[in-house]
Image (cartoon, coloured by chain):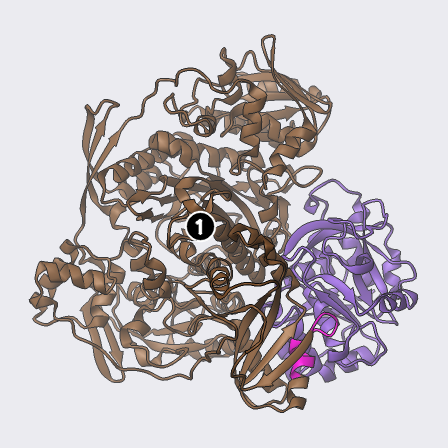
Amino acid sequence: MARPRVLIFHSPGTNRDAETLRALELAGAEAEIAHVWDVRAGTVSLTDCRAVVLPGGFGYGDALGAGILQALDLTTWLQDAVGTFVGQGGRVLGICNGFQTLVKSGLLDGGCEPVKPGNRAVTLTHNERGHFECRWVHMAPAADCAADWLRGLSMPVFCPVAHGEGRFLTQDANTLNHLAVQGRIALRYVHADGRAAAGSYPHNPNGSVGDVAGICSPDGLVVGFMPHPEDHLLRRHSPVPVPVDAMGLRLFEAFVEAL
Amino acid sequence: MIRLEIRGGLGHRARAVTAQLPFLGLAATGACEATAVYFLDADFDDDALELLCARLLRDPVTETAAWMRDPRNNAGSPAAVEVARKRGVTDAEARVLENALVRLGLPPARAARATRYEFAGSLGEEDLHRIARDLLCNATTERYAVGWLQPEFEEGAGHSSRCETIPVRALTDGRLVALSRDRGLALNLAEMQYIRRAFRDFGRDPTDVELETLAQTWSEHCQHKTFKARIRFRHEDLHGRTIGAETIDGIFDTCIRAVNREVAKAWLVSVFEDDAGVIRFTDALDLAFKVETHNHPSALDPFGGAHTGVGGVVRDVLGVSARPIAATDVLCFGPPDLPDAAVPAGTLHPRRIREGVVRGIGDYGNKLGLPTLSGAIVYDRGYVNNPLVYCGCIGVAPHGVHPTGAEVGDLVVALGGRTGLDGLHGATFSSADLAEDTRETQGSAVQIGDPILEKGLMELLGQARDERLYTAVTDCGAGGFSSAIGEMGEELGVEVHLDRIRVKYPALAPWELWLSEAQERMVVAVPPARLARLEVLADHWEVELSVLGKFTGNRELHVRHEGRTVGRLPMDFVHHGWPRPELNAIHREPSTCAPAGTPWADGEQALKTLLTHPSVSSKEAVIRTFDHEVRGGTLVRPLTGPCQDGPADGVVFEPLEAAGSGRAVAVGHGINPMLGLHDPYAMGGAVVDEAVRNLVCAGADPDHIALLDNFCWGNPTLPDRLGALVRAAQGCRDAAIALQVPFISGKDSLYNEYDGKPIPGTLLISGIGIVPDVDHCMTVHAKFSGSLLFVLGDTRAELGGSLLHCLYGLSGGVPPVTEAAFGDRYRALHGLIRSGSVLSAHDASEGGLALAAAEMALAGRMGMELDLTEVHADPWHALFSESNGRILIEVDPEAVETVTNACRDLPLLCLGRLGGKRVLMRHHETVHVDAAVEALTAYWRGAE
């Protein structure tokens, strides 16, 4: 079977693109890092690619808030290219800064769609503890998640978070319920055995409501989450011994398989 | 002008401020609220502002926005302080906002930012000023107002052509000294006289550009004059009798370079030649490593100082054509619980320094995408006025790609950030003592960085290197262009046009353009035919490029501005004209008599005292604010064990670039200033040994380890300071030769004094080692119940200068030594690690075997029952002696024979067995420690 082509967007300040590339390649994709300006200029085309990944980093230094400036890129320069891509059923995966970007751009929102960027019902904001934090967490797919490929994971994924603005909040409790009902909660922070973190630190590392680590669009094609499965591709990457199916690589394998 | 307030999103900042208020005695003040304020030098209508808020400034879930036009007064507003960066201090966020306005289709406008803090309760104006000064605003880089702050916008660009001639030929000695002081040249009388004589020979007076160039190039910071000086050294015994007198022909040559004459390693690539040391890693790859200090700037502005410290050392690695792949940090602070009254005027509280430094390191390293892996924090009162901030960077490069040969006709090309008044006189400023008024007088020496700009530089230079677009590269560090271009052009000569330098704002004098230490700048030599391609790449990575001049071949430094010559000197004079200093040094040996009596009544209490000391206890709160996972290759982390909270010796990572090679990189440190206060020679040896042991304990091959030396010391013109420095350097030389480990790079930071008091002389040894097999890394934490714990290495009565003595205020005693025989132990251990016979390994250093065993236990949440009778006849020495060369190893009972065979000619002793939930240490019949693992863990974690 041909290896599906995946583009990894690079903006000024992107820094987890190289390990994301490695993750996708190990998972069976033909991955390539593309500078967003080349996408904007049309020198890199999205037409024959199956997925776009927005990797981790500090796009534009997170000036004016994490993901804000990259979201501006998505909704101005890249609006046509990405809009067409998503409209034709292309998949988008946002990791950490990429997730922040998807949320802030309105591409991945909790309210009624389509939504204007200034009118979002969900956000990612400063961690409850007020600072950047790097630690390993477990995350598991939420029940009835619309991104069905995530449900193929046989156990919680063990991988690090490394962010200062990863606290998922919604406008109100209704929005959170609405998301769950629509199958739009993709991943939640859990204990190693899969029990809900139930807001307890450090299992839920940033104070996200509902232990939400990631969400998706109603059709499941656009997915974003905060943790970094791309930093757990080999068994030796794990700080403590865990089953091989807890590797972050499994998530990428499931993703690539669905393409 | 428009003022926008965005409320609700800075709750984390407000909580942090609120938590600090009690330290100011203002606990009853009540909560603080923080608000982001933006200023626009424009007149947008409400629709435009609503668009701006919706798209960029206001988070619809957490924030609300309000704006007003031309705010004039703030009558009736609550008690509030507003803080903004000073004009000229880098504010990347304001620039981003300006760019984004245009993206939204709004007219261009200048932007500025502030943070507003409002306080509940009744606070007088004086209280607000105090909160602002002591908590919110750093006067070095920021300004504040009680109430509303008026913004200052960055101005457009332009030039001033002021260039003065300084009549040094006619000055008396007294006037020469005054000139050096008033201009901040940090040149002494002999050097000023040298300049006067030289210009009398030239038959003219120097321009300010020339004088400043000489001051920078000849500064301690750039020339390491002390390490090159001829030193008359007198060595005294305890009673002041001379036991040795010698002339030391340069510490650098006789103590550092001397090591490499004795230790030949085929894998050394570039040693003490470039901005960073370079060694072979795999067949295809080299590793670069450099550690720098940024002490003086961090004392004034902890965030900015540490921020630019990371940025600077990263550029050192770029300067050897390597890609930065990891960062290290070692920090020395005053005690965090120091009473406010004990903090001298003009000095920030250690707590505030720590907070800023840690935030600065994290902000830069995290944003650059470098894992900040290895580090240490030492707390001592000696660092209250002079904190130490050691920033390290490791890079990787394909072997043989670093070009070092600019040719005549090549262009001098500046890349990166714009030039402003920031960082003027950094090199000379770091070559003098700090004083109470330094914050006001030298504020411009401190800057704030822009890691995203540096990231662009990093990408650009990597690509330019691969396409062979440059023939030489160097970073713009201390001394700015004057040092960078001056050094690059040393062999060929160079002509530079200052008016081609891109500036942040107008009215910079030529010498200011030439000396500015604005951040994120590199200089490359580019053959004219390759310039066009470099311009394309620079445009792609959004890095500004300017062609400043060319390499001429006339061995002259020729500086021009707007068509006029503002400086013209022979390169030989610039680089070699300075007089080699002669210095005096004296060192008196310490008493080796053991202190009378032992004030610690029981071993457990002593162990608790050690575990709770902030230098020993958990650094997790700091470590977790650094990304130690980015790049996806971290194998041994700074936090270990099943709960991922135990201590580590060395850290190990597998660079992405080397994936598949099977090899990894270990990094470790040795630092022990308390031992240095007792005996600097012993410290020099101990820190070399500790760095090597840390690496071996992590899995590195002891025959593939390289070291870096970083000396932080007081005023070297005072003989006692210099005497201790000489001894420390000799100690590290002898130990490095004994253990057969070479030095590849080093740096010194002197004049760390305040009010006549020096810091404890501090030698940091950083080590980089190759782990030959990624699957045989080693960690500290105790792993399996039923394993046996051995100590490899003998224990002697060496409590002199130990942490225990320091904590109990004792002096005297025999300090530890370092011997060549230790190397055999490390090779044996490495073989056992490779064969999988060792389950965990931990070096015993400060706090002795007792602390090392306790750390293994708490990291592994695993009890142990140890009998230390055979370790040493005296139980206190058995528990706490700090003899070097010792490693605790956990061995599976089935592997005992393998281990004892491998160590049959080495001092190896079985101490006991792992298991249970308590740590028990006995000596003969007496139980000295009997504590629950949980209790030890709590002590160790509690002091954070």
Q: Which residue is drawn at 87% across and 51% down?
A: A154
- Location of the C terminus of chain B (image quadrant): top right
Magenta highlight on residue B59: yes
Q: Is residue A144 visible?
A: yes
Say which colour chain B has: brown
Q: Give the range drawn in magenta.
A: B52-63
Residue closer to the observer: B583 or A17: B583
Letter of the chain in purple: A
Name the image quarter holding residue B592.
top left
Residue B608 horizontal/vertical position (percent)? 58, 28
In this image, B223 relative to B342: left or right?
left
Q: SS class of the residue under badge 1? A: strand
Residue B781 horizontal/vertical position (percent)? 65, 33
Question: In the displayed image of the protein, which residue is found farthest to the top?
Answer: B925
Q: Is residue B768 visible?
A: no
In this image, A23 relative to B907: left or right?
right
Q: Which residue is drawn at 9% across and 65% down?
A: B171
Residue B370 horizontal/vertical position (percent)? 56, 56
Name the image quarter holding residue A112.
bottom right
Q: Which residue is drawn at 38% across and 38% down?
A: B264
Residue closer to the observer: B670 or B544: B670
Q: Mark 1 points at which residue?
A: B389
Give the chain letter at badge 1.
Answer: B
Q: Count all numbered tags in the image, as a single digit.
A: 1
Residue B574 lies, with reference to residue B783, above or below; the image says below
User: Mark 1 is on which residue type?
Assistant: Val
Residue closer to the observer: B752 or B884: B752
Residue B578 lies, with reference to residue B109, above or below; the image says above
Residue A173 horizontal/vertical position (percent)? 85, 65
